[in-house]
Image (spheres, helix red, strand yellow):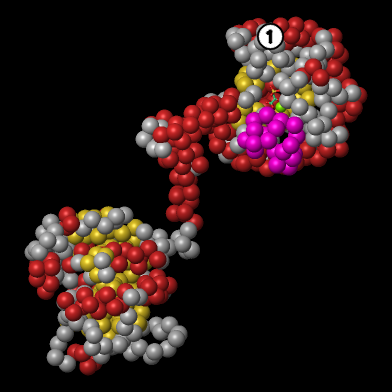
Amino acid sequence: MNRKNKSSKLRQLLLSPQLEFIMEAHNGISARIVQEAGFKGIWASGLALSAQYGVRDNNEASWTQVVEMLEFMADVTQIPILLDGDTGYGNFNNMRRLVRKLEQRGIAGVCIEDKLFPKTNSFINGNRQPLADIDEFCGKIQAGKDSQTDEDFCIIARVEAFIAGWDLAEAMRRAEAYHAAGADAILIHSKLFRPDQVLAFAKEWANRCPLVIVPTKYYSTASDVFREADVSLVIWANHMMRAAVASMQAIAREVQASETLVNIEDQIVPVKEIFRLQGADELLAAEKRYLSNGVQHTHAIVLAATRGKEFQGLTLDKPKVMLPIGGKPLLRHLLEQFKKVSINDVTVVGGYKAETIDVPDIKLIHNQEYATTGELVSLTYAQPSFNDDMLVSYGDLLFRSYILRDLLGCPGEIVAVVDSAINNKSLSGSPDYAYCSAPDELSVFRQDVNLLQICKTTSNSEKKAHGRWIGMLRFRSQGRQSLEAALSELQTQDNFNTMSLTDLCNYLIKQGKPIKVLYIRGHWLDVNSLDDLDLAFQLQN
Ligand code: SPV
Ligand code: MG
């Protein structure tokens, strides 16, 4: 919605043959609420804007502070905003600058009143309020009109004669002068509880130009009365602010007195309604579009189906990943490492005693056939969670944070982490030996090395191997496609049920899908034995 569009919409409201209504708003969220309710325009009330800043309606908030808030309001709405511009915040010169700034911020029009700066709200001692000199005020209107660059920008002149205790004749004299000076509409204000003054004025005015009213005091008058009187626009001037204050007072009092939220929770909107009004969904969608290269949106898939029989009694009632290390389940340590690198989407494929995996913020999938199947079957369970930036990891891994950080920064469609410190005696279990296109040169620079094969322990394989694969793989979009293709091809093989991730790696390599190697030197552990639990504790501390 461009600026021009908004100003022409405001002009249409003024010129429309039917009675139109606009509603007060005083900040971004109230503006949005007014728009959602179906109003065709917004009154940026001076009273409400100063009230939301907690100051008086006496120009205590500077005009730039007002304009600042208007920008937030205009940014989140498509309907026109008419600013209650008080007296124009100074003389003709200030008015010129105001109009230019309002146009720049997408405000459709401004209403100025014929009082003196600093003004006082019309309902506070109105009788004592001096009015502006008519000629001086006309000069201000002209200056405003001369400085607008958008022909539809509206300047409305507000006649305060009735407020200040003058009669219809004075009100008419002023309105005619302001109309002649170029005002696009006249706002006639009254503080009476009955509409008599404005109706008398409307009759006399006889639609010389659009007429605007603010029925705050004579609110009990039916709108049809205004229709019949040929009023163009009704401003509901302060009702969003008063509604908010009533609600905030009631809620604050209740919570203060009861020291609990249970009584009020159902009386207020849920937090998700605030998110909706803020447009949180749009940001999530935009992140998907624009953030693919900055912030990580890696999805981690954790294979955690096995019991870990080696732990005997310790895993009678829970799977290995739930064994406590330093008071925390192994899986939680892994998730914390993920969190450190902003991996928050985690799918865990459980199997044995999966119901005991009660860590928060994960998607838990149950491989029901865990007892008779292997890692690739578990991985296929997680297939709906696959995305173009994913990590596949064993659930019993512990490692220092930098390993994950380096893996995320390592180029390659498929990347495997290989520990070149092969003689590290502290490692147990049945290692997956990695054969690579080049040994680890221990260089600080990243080497371009491909994985050639992974084998389980054999008598002499340890000597020739370049390292141990630690049980972690990274897939980007092409890599993910290769992975999906490999899984569907392997599924047709008889022994698919017992296949492991190493079988998958070897298959991918055979299919000509390169797997890049990220070399590390120690600082990790797969927890395979009771001794490992002690080591794990040390690694974490
Ligand atoms: C405002 O909303 O700030 C107005 C209207 O100027 S009134 O308070 O009724 O004078
Ligand atoms: Mg005002």
The image quadrant where one finds ligand 1 is top right
User: Compared to 273, does 535 lie above or below?
Assistant: below
Crowd around label 1: few <14 · some 14–19 · many ≥20 (10 Å)? many
At 64% from the left and 30% from the top, the residue drawn is: 48
Residue 104 vs residue 224: left or right? Answer: right
At 81% from the left and 19% from the top, the residue drawn is: 128
At 65% from the left and 28% from the top, the residue drawn is: 43
Of 50 and 135, nearer the camera is 50
Question: Which amino acid type corresponds to the residue marked 1 in the rendered image?
Answer: Pro
Residue 65 vs residue 157: left or right? Answer: left
Residue 521 vs residue 60: left or right? Answer: left
* Range of residues picked out in magenta: 46-66
The quarter of the picture where the N terminus appears is top right
Question: Which image quarter: residue 502?
Answer: bottom left
User: Compared to 361, does 218 lie above or below?
Assistant: above
Secondary structure of the residue carrying numbered label 1: loop
- Magenta stretch: includes residue 159: no
User: Compared to 23, does 502 lie above or below?
Assistant: below
Q: Which residue is mark 1?
A: 195
Can you give x and y, in whole percent of width and height, for residue 511 in the image? 25, 74
Can you give x and y, in whole percent of width and height, for residue 116 in the image? 83, 28
- Residue situated furthest right in the rendering: 135
Residue 317 vs residue 322: left or right? Answer: left
Of 460 and 322, nearer the camera is 322
Can you give x and y, in whole percent of width and height, for residue 5 in the image? 65, 34
Please give the count of numbered marks on the rendered protein: 1
User: Compared to 407, does 300 lie above or below?
Assistant: above
Indicate if the residue with disc 1 has its beta carbon within 8 Å of ligand 1: no
Question: Which image quarter: residue 270?
Answer: top left
